Image (cartoon, grey):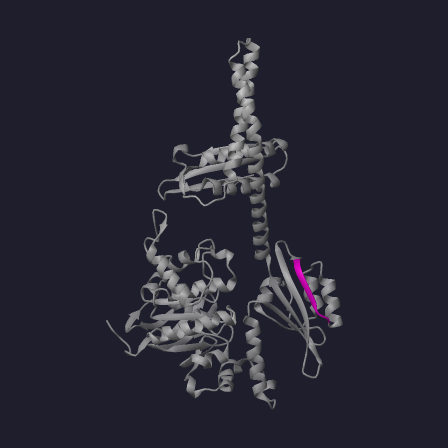
Amino acid sequence: MKQGTPNLLLKMKNIHLSYGENIALRGLDFSLKRGEIHALVGAHRAGKSSLVKILSGAVKKDRGSIIYDEKKIDFFTPQSAIKNGIGIVYQHLNIIPPLNAMENIFAGQTRRMHHFGILNQDIVKRTDALFERLNLDFNPSIPLYRLSRGQQYMVEFARAISFNPRLLILDELSSKLTPDEMENVYPAILTIKEQGTSIIYISHNIDEIFSFANRVTILKEGRRVDTEGIEDLDRIKLVKLTYSFVLTSEELKKENRELFYFKRYNENIIKNIPVGVIILDTDNRIYLMNFAAMKILEPKGISVIDQPIETLLNSNPFDEKDQIMTRIKRREKLFLEDVSYGKNKTLKISVLPFKDENYTFLGSIILLEDISLDRSLKQYMLRTEKISSIAGLAAGIAHEINNPLGIVRNYVELLKLKDLDLDGNEKLQKIENEINRINKIIGSLLSFSKFSEVPRDLTKLPDVLNEVILLLEHRFKEKNIKVRQIIDHNEDAVILGDDNKLKQLFINLLVNSLEAVTDNGRIEIAVSADRKNNVLEMTFSD
């Protein structure tokens, strides 16, 4: 049954939402016209993300009414949101890193993306069209974990617009992309709007909102403060409406109130950028520490604001803290790479003194970046390149061994024709057995060294495992390590795959185990079949 106003795509009335004891939305009202760009602004925890989660189906409202496309909706699910034409780019990445761009964009939108291992050509054409439309110049078949953060967000944006949504929600998109990338996004947004799509645009960038929004809704503590047409607003008024509630009574008494509105506005931008930022005053006390810095350093047991920076550094000790403190006190720049922090973090740290136009010292800025994942990926790539070089070297050695080995085999065949005694025949048989063993090892080396692209074929995992174990047999013997294979239904352990790439994978896993396990240890490799889901599971334990 149709309800509501025809020119409204969405109307939310008296929406309440809580997360346990924390109240997120307190009777929120919000409406969205067809074919408009509606900006949503507010300070941290104003309720913007909660509104998005309700429309995406991530959470259900506690109470209130939703009318979408003139129909009453009790609640959305992720599936029904897509079915109703709601596309979303979240504030935080929502991708599957091992999959490539095509697979991420069209996952769940089509029943069959591949047919006998060949990509559906319609999917390829649609991906090419999206990439051309957004001026994306990277290969869509590359796994997303190998792309930059900005490129990953562009893939998520491409996914959101791939099915021509009726409602597109963009949550802080411009804070994740470079200006060049946003230059490709803005025209796409305007084109989508002209085609009749309604857009909810969440942003802290006031200039951006004034560039193309039609209306603006200001949220505060889970409620709607006001909704205005962009033509009825100026920047000062919008900043006042958005951030005035965080001013103290003392600040309100000062002559230049606009200065404090913009101060709070700028602080809110700093708090939400993805790089860790700590701002110190002239006495080296912490004036501001944003959410990213909190997440990186995880200060425990102390209230950081207005505390000396030494207090924070001493509570989270790392080797370079003395060097950092020296530069801060001297008001000098400092750039550090690969700073070990905690058990498993690697940081990039910059210390920057800042001054006003009269060169008066105002304080210091500390920038923090968690580069742990980047370092792990680089180490993995270096290790892969090393294995590739070893494989090439192994292939050369194998070819060189093959020539004299062939001559030895020929002489063994000639000796077998002679009339030898029993002892001579036994020794000759042992020589032949060892030659066959060397041949198998060389065959495995040559197989491992083949890196050319080959079609996937039926592959029996136990056979691949046995070849790899044979290659590494001398390493196991050096540490007296026993290798045990547990194969559940050996005849079922067959997949469609690439022998050589599987060998590289198994070698990496077994070499890791060799380095981890002590002498006289044990490595177990289990292969089990799940017939119901048509899946094979392999487990390497040391």
- Against 462, is 324 above or below? below
Indicate whether 400 appears above or below 185: above
What residue occupies the far bottom of the structure in this picture? 255
Above or below, comparing residue 447 to residue 29 in the picture: above
Q: How many marks?
A: 0
Residue 38 seen by the camera? yes
Towards the viewer: 251 or 99: 99
Q: Which is more toward the observer, 447 or 300? A: 447
Residue 394 location (% of width, % of height) = 57, 37
Quadrant in the picture for the C terminus? top right
The residue range painted magenta reads 332-339
Asked if 357 appears above or below 368 in the picture, the reply is below
Q: Residue at x 44, y 76 (%)?
A: 40
Which residue lies at the image location 45% right of the left edge and 61% below the top edge? 94
Residue nearest the viewer, comparing 67 with 384: 384
Residue that appears at 47% across and 55% down: 143
